[in-house]
Image (cartoon, coloured by chain):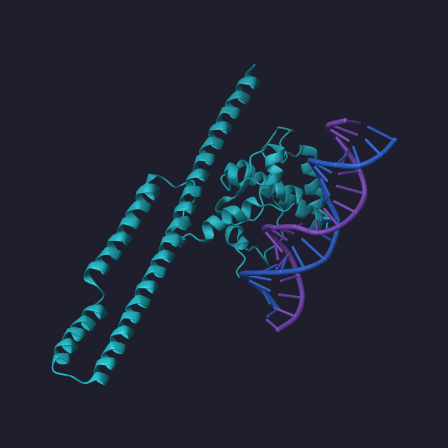
Chain colours: A cyan, B blue, C purple
Amino acid sequence: MADPRHSISGNTAAKPPRTQFRRPRSKDRDDFWHISQADWAALLEANAAPATRSAARKKLRLIEHVAELMETDVGITVPDFAMCELCRTAGVACRVARGATSMACAKCMKHKKPCEAGPVMQRGQQEQPPSMFSTSWRALDSSSAEIPLNDQHSDVNAGMENAGEERMLQGSPERSVTDKREAGSDTSLLGSSTHSRSNDLEEEHSARRLKRQRQREEDLANEEIEVLKLEAKAARLAMEADVFAAQSEARLMRAVYERRKSIERRR
DNA sequence: GTGATTCGCGGAGTTCAGAG
DNA sequence: CTCTGAACTCCGCGAATCAC
């Protein structure tokens, strides 16, 4: 299985070691991804020294990635139902990499703890047709939900019912052929009087009936599978809508918070 | 003071792509 | 094919903090 992690960040292997990292923008000490100027400078210094470079770079990458998830569009806010335990208990926004290509949320990443938010989001995507997630989730608009879920479902069901009805009304091609054959054999039967011949026809008839019954059962099973697939798709679309709503709410909260902060600063 | 919880981090393990 | 370096997850441990 290909590791999806590399698809988002890109593999930068065999490139010169990085010397520049994005420093977290947060000035709020309460933010778990906040880092002081002094600590950041110390890390950069450690990154410059060959002896401490490896550990420092690891920390810098981690801080950078966590801050990106929390502060930029690289991250998306996970809806309440998919939030990980750590974020839930800490009461912070649970943010995973856009498209959930990364398995852990920012906080779990920071604390190096297992995270269930990423996998939940990822599952929602992996079952999507590729086109569904070729653009960002945030970019989803009314065009991606042209048909309301209920309508989609009912339309689909109606379609399937119609298809089923059509099959029932028209009968399968095989059915019509056999019926014709049956009719033909029925007429030929009129001229026959032997008992064995009658038994043969009886057996042939019951075999055909059995075959038709099996065909109907198979059709029914296939239809059930289609229904299950569509129900799964509807569930995914519903989750997507929740994600979009949560993102909008988070953006709104951020805007309100920034505004309040700027007012406080002016005082 | 003590036990429980939370936090922070080292390091192991896995996967990948590019270079040799 | 092997080596190297980057990205990522998460186990497990010690330190810090909290509740009683």
Q: In this view, does A152 lie above or below A164?
A: above
Quadrant location of the C terminus of chain A in the rendered image: top right
Residue occupying image coordinates x 16% and y 72%: A180
Q: Is residue A156 left or right of residue A103?
A: left
Q: Position of residue A132 (x, y in %)?
A: 39, 49
Tell me if I can see residue A206 in this picture: yes
- Residue A22 in view of the camera: no
Image point (67%, 37%), residue name: A40
Q: Is A85 positioned to the left or the right of A155 in the image?
A: right
Q: Which of A139 and A114 is in front in this view?
A: A114
Foreground residue among A209 and A199:
A199
> In the rendering, at what x and y percent does residue A254 appear?
51, 29
Identify the image quadrant of residue A30: top right
Compared across the picture, whether A66 is left or right of B8 comes to: left
In this rendering, is residue A257 above or below A41? Answer: above
- Determine the image quadrant of residue A138: top left
Give percent across and percent down for residue C2: 66, 70
Residue reaching furthest to the top: A267
Q: Position of residue A207 (x, y in %)?
A: 29, 74
- A193 or A92, which is in the foreground? A193
- Residue at horizontal 21 percent and vertical 63 percent from the top: A171
Observer-nearest of A105 and A238: A238
Name the residue located 47 percent from the left edge and 35 percent from the top edge. Answer: A246
| A87 versus B20 height, above or below | above
Q: How many labels does the image show?
A: 0
